[in-house]
Image (tube, grey):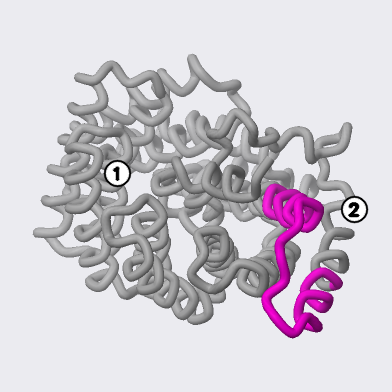
């Protein structure tokens, strides 16, 4: 299989795999943009995990091999040919980068992805599509590590190179722009991020059409960015965009029901931010009910849906129901994320606060003791 076929497959849907998370875990799950397995030739990620679902040591073993390949290439007086064997090494390394990102092993992914990018540039040149795809993936990995300045530098360069090489109306250019906007948001440069998101949307509409799923996800990305920017006007526009996306996905009979639920969840949070609590509650009840039908009770999606509804209920003084929901979310978070996780501790804190508000001090102390013992 040629290297370009695999690396291009990583981008074909990349541009737009964005999750909509509640505030407390927005920073936890960041491996979104750039994880694509759409090519029939692309080996599924499960084939790179061992029997226990863990990342095998062979993932890390590729790093020295890539380093040797780079060193050999640099000793050549002219640009070396990327042989089939070397291409296979790079392809395998890039596949493993995606698995490492998915498993949030970002430090290892960064090192391996850097090697892939360097090897591609040495063998293929800085402006080759595969070199640029590797750069986009490295930018994503750096963002996930919180190395936003480095991510900003490489993605800014990559956007410029893609625009010159392929033009603005190109899927790789759009992917690089989308990742750049996400980095800007992570750096609280929301106004700049909004500008980039709008450019992506304008181009996406021209290429794919307004109601194409890729354009709709770009609209959702803009809405999320506007909410992070804050302000009444931005919240109003975010709500309008989310309603527009939701209507379009429903009208098209979307095959991805989870995408519809993500948009609904995002709209619920926007309505909550605007103080439209009854409308938010209605949507969030639908999201939770649908999530429970499609996911097991102990799932990250169920925890987010439960937490969002509980937060909205608390604002309406519906404390007893919120307590019940947070008990469920606490139990699920312990199973899904573990007793030492931020998610679990956040659910425990919400539950304790609710019990305290109701004067249930002894029960609150029991929750605290149980959490401390469980996490020990």
Place of residue 55 in the rendered image (x, y in percent of width and height, measured from the top left): 82, 47
Check residue 273 for magenta coloring.
no
**Camera-side residue of 174 and 198:** 174
**Camera-side residue of 136 and 145:** 136
Residue count near mark 1 (Cα–Cα under 10 Å), binned few <14, some 14–19, many ≥20: many
Q: Quadrant of residue 318?
A: top left
Task: Return the residue at label 1.
Answer: 269
Q: Is residue 132 left or right of residue 313?
A: right
Which residue is at a point 27% across and 28% down the rendered structure image?
283
Mark drawn on residue 57: 2
Which residue is at a point 49% across and 19% down the rendered structure image?
292
- Whether residue 165 can be seen here: yes
Mark drawn on residue 48: none
Above or below, 136 relative to 204: below
Q: Is residue 234 left or right of residue 350?
A: left
- Whether residue 316 can be seen here: no
Place of residue 24 in the rendered image (x, y in percent of width and height, measured from the top left): 47, 54
Magenta span covers which residues?
A: 68-95
Place of residue 197 in the rendered image (x, y in percent of width and height, measured from the top left): 26, 59
Place of residue 8 in the rendered image (x, y in percent of width and height, measured from the top left): 52, 47
**Camera-side residue of 293 and 334:** 293
Q: Secondary structure at mark 2?
A: loop
Above or below, 40 relative to 270: above
Q: Secondary structure at mark 1?
A: helix
Which residue is at a point 49% across and 81% down the rendered structure image?
149
Q: Quadrant of residue 261?
A: top left
Say whether disc 2 or disc 1 marks the residue closer to the N-terminus.
2
């Amino acid at each position: 299989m040629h290297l370009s076929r695999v690396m291009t497959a990583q981008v074909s849907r990349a541009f737009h795999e964005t999750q909509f998370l509640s505030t407390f875990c927005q920073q936890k799950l960041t491996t979104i943009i750039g994880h694509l397995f759409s090519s029939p030739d692309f080996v599924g990620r499960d084939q790179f995990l061992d029997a226990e679902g863990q990342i095998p040591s062979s993932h890390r073993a590729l790093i020295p091999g890539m380093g040797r390949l780079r060193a050999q290439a640099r000793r050549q007086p002219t640009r070396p040919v990327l042989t089939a064997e070397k291409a296979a090494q790079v392809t395998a390394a890039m596949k493993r980068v995606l698995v490492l990102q998915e498993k949030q092993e970002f430090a290892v992914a960064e090192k391996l992805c850097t090697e892939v990018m360097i090897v591609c540039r040495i063998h293929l040149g800085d402006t080759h599509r595969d070199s640029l795809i590797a750069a986009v993936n490295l930018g994503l990995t750096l963002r996930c590590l919180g190395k936003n300045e480095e991510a900003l530098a490489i993605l800014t360069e990559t956007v410029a190179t893609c625009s010159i090489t392929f033009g603005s109306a190109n899927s790789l250019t759009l992917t690089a722009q989308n990742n750049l906007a996400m980095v800007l948001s992570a750096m609280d440069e929301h106004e700049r991020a909004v500008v980039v998101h709008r450019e992506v949307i304008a181009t996406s509409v021209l290429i794919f059409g307004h109601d194409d799923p890729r354009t709709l996800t770009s609209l959702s990305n803009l809405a999320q960015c506007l909410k992070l920017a804050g302000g009444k006007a931005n919240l109003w526009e975010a709500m309008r965009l989310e309603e527009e996306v939701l209507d379009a996905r429903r009208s098209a009979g979307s095959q991805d029901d989870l995408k519809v639920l993500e948009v609904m969840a995002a709209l619920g949070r926007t309505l909550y931010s605007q103080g439209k609590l009854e409308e938010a509650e209605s949507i969030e009840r639908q999201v939770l009910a649908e999530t429970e039908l499609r996911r097991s009770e102990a799932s990250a999606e169920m925890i987010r849906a439960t937490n969002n509804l509980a937060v909205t209920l608390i604002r309406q003084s519906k404390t007893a129901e919120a307590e019940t929901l947070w008990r469920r979310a606490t139990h699920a978070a312990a199973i899904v994320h573990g007793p030492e996780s931020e998610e679990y501790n956040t659910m425990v804190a919400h539950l304790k606060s609710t019990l305290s508000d109701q004067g249930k001090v002894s029960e609150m102390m029991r929750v605290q003791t149980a959490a401390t013992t469980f996490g020990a």
